[in-house]
Amino acid sequence: MRLLVLAAALAIAACAGKPQPPDWQVSARGALDRYERAFLAGNARAADQEFAIARQQLAATGNATVVARAELTRCALQVASLAFEPCPGFEVLRADAAAAERAYADYLAGAAVAPDLLPPQHRAVVTGGEAALAKVADPLARLVAAGVLVRANRASPQVLATAADSASQQGWRRPLLAWLGAQLRLAEQRGATDEAQALRRRIELAGGQR
């Protein structure tokens, strides 16, 4: 997944003449890709099934690092969709995870972390806050960073707009509905009636109700 690459363990050899990767790598990578697409589309059942396949393949190696990274991928997608839930799948592996994995988990939880331990696309957000958000090139990483800002109470209305636009441009229904919902609640709190009505119509459209 683009958010947190599963290192060389999940990289498929790109050059001719190199040994073919073992079956578990191919299966895990494919399942994680399908999991990501299903989650972002809002297909929870398919997402759960694909993640279970990926985790089973990764766990068969006995390598806690690759399993921990997959669990962090799941946690990151939840944060990208404003689902601020515990990350139990990672926590049971925390003791065997490297410093970078522990730092990323803490970052997703909204805690202060050392930027140099994070994936490159998130370092600037830690130091620059929402001003750096629009410069995050990968749209999914941008959503995750926006979710972290919300979780850490560092987000302005512009963060919500940036995240909603990012999800909309990619056609990612689940995070789009979450971010539109956050915008709607803010508009209602401000008494912005026209804006709230427009957001409700957009939510109905994205949710297949119009």
Image (cartoon, rainbow, N blue to C red):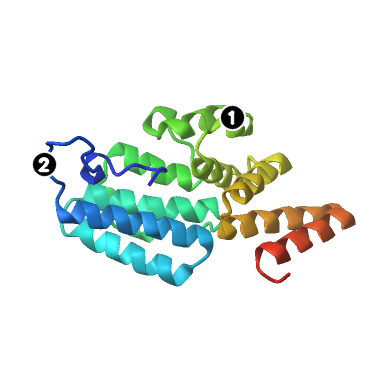
Residue 167's x, y, as percent? 60, 50
> Quadrant of residue 129 in the image?
top right
In terms of depth relative to the viewer, which is nearer, 95 or 193? 193
Disc number for residue 12: none
Q: How many discs mark residues in the rendered view? A: 2
Query: Residue at 51% of width from left, 52% of height from top?
Result: 79
9 relative to 110 in the view: left or right: left
- Is any part of residue 93 visible from this angle? no
Residue 181's x, y, as percent? 69, 59
> Quadrant of residue 154 in the image?
top right
96 relative to 50 in the view: left or right: left
Q: Is residue 51 above or below residue 183?
A: below
Disc number for residue 132: 1
Q: Which kind of residue does numbered mark 2 sit on? A: Pro
In terms of depth relative to the viewer, which is nearer, 75 or 102? 75
> Quadrant of residue 4 in the image?
top left
Question: In which quadrant will I find the C terminus?
Answer: bottom right
Query: Residue at 35% of width from left, 64% of height from top?
Result: 50
Residue 171's x, y, as percent? 58, 54
Q: Earlier in the sequence, mark 2 or mark 1?
A: 2
For marks 2 and 1, give the one nearer the viewer: 2
Residue 115's x, y, as percent? 44, 29
Q: Whole-Å distance between the Cαs marked 2 and 1?
A: 41 Å
In terms of depth relative to the viewer, which is nearer, 47 or 125? 47
Farthest residue to the front: give it: 16
Q: Is residue 210 above or below residue 198?
A: below
Query: Residue at 11% of width from left, 41% of height from top?
Result: 19
Q: Which kind of residue does numbered mark 1 sit on? A: Ala
- Is any part of residue 169 visible from this angle? yes
Mark 1 is surrounded, within 10 Å at the Cα level, by few (under 14), some (14 to 19) or many (20 or more) other residues, namely: some
User: What residue would you read off at disc 2?
Assistant: 19
160 relative to 194 in the view: left or right: left
